[in-house]
Each structure stands twice: as C-alpha cells, then as structure tokens.
Amino acid sequence: MILDTLDNVSSLAALSPAFAEAAAFLAATDLAALEPGRFDVGTRGASVIVACGGARRADEGRLEAHRRFIDIQVLLAGRESIGWRPLAACRAPEADYDPATDLQFFADPPQAWLPLEPGQFAVFWPADAHLPQVGEGDMRKVVVKVPVQEG
C-alpha cells in the first residue's frame, strides 16, 4: 500500500508503463471536471472510475481484494477512511474470487484505517484487502484500475 499526495503522483511512473500512463493522466487531468462513470485511459489496459455519493459506515462495507488490477484511489472531495488488512491475513471469505468482476469479498475486519484528505491517493496491490468509501457525508473520488499484467 502507498499513501501520498497528487503532487507526487509522477513517482508511480517508474513502476511500469501502465503506471506511467495512469500517473500522467492523474497529473494532467482536471479531475474535478470529470463526469461520473467509467472509461479507459491510455493504451495499456488501465481504466478510470469517477464516483460521487454518500459515504458509508464501516459496518456497511466489506473488505475487497483484486487479482488482475491494482487500485489507485484518489479522494477529490469529502473525507474518507479506507480499511486495510493484508490479504494473507484474511480468513473469512464471503465467496470465491469472481474473475468477471475481479473481486473477492471478506468478512474479516480491517487491521488498520487509512484516512484520506482531498488531494491524496492510496495504491492498493492485490496483496492488500481494502474497504473504501467509509466516512460521513458526500465524497467524490477517482479510482484508476491499473492492470497487474499489461494488456
């Protein structure tokens, strides 16, 4: 897991060509002007989800994990805390991994909480189970899904 500010998002470019495209998109785009929805970005298989809406309570969510994509979660407005637990420490899967949605949910509680302020981002690898969108009030965020293996 990585926590940083958008001022330093270009440091992700060294990780892979797909991360380089994602970092360039985040650095060069007026994120606040994006319409809610999902769209592809770049040529290396990354996509962007723009979400607006109310936060949830911690007891309303479940830890989730992905295998094919790495999440770069960027908070634009509101306050958010993201629960985290190492995937290896998750003992209570709610169902098998679903390759169609690249999701598996767990009933385990988060081990730690990561508070995000607007202008910060967090990166969650496949080894990071996470519970996003916990907070109060409305929030606006962008999630960039970066493929583990470029396609």
Image (cartoon, rainbow, N blue to C red):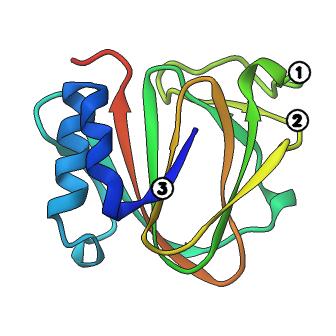
Label at residue 4: 3
Q: Residues within 10 Å of mark 1 (few under 14, many from 20)?
A: few
Sequence-first tag of 2 and 3: 3
* Residue 45 appears in the rendering: no
Q: The residue under label 1 is which amino acid type?
A: Arg
Residue under label 1, please give it: 91
Residue drawn where x is 83% and y is 22% of the image: 89
72 relative to 32, above or below: above
Sequence-first tag of 3 and 1: 3
Q: Quadrant of the N terminus?
A: top right
Q: Residue furthest left?
A: 43
The location of residue 8, given as percent across then percent down, is 34, 56
Instruction: Between label 2 and label 3, give the one nearer the viewer.
Output: 3
Label at residue 134: none
Q: The residue under label 2 is which amino acid type?
A: Asp
For label 1, the SS is loop
Label at residue 108: 2
CA distance separating discs 2 and 3: 26 Å
CA distance separating discs 1 and 2: 7 Å
Q: Quadrant of the C terminus?
A: top left
Q: The residue under label 3 is which amino acid type?
A: Asp
Residue drawn where x is 64% and y is 19% of the image: 97
CA distance separating discs 3 and 1: 29 Å
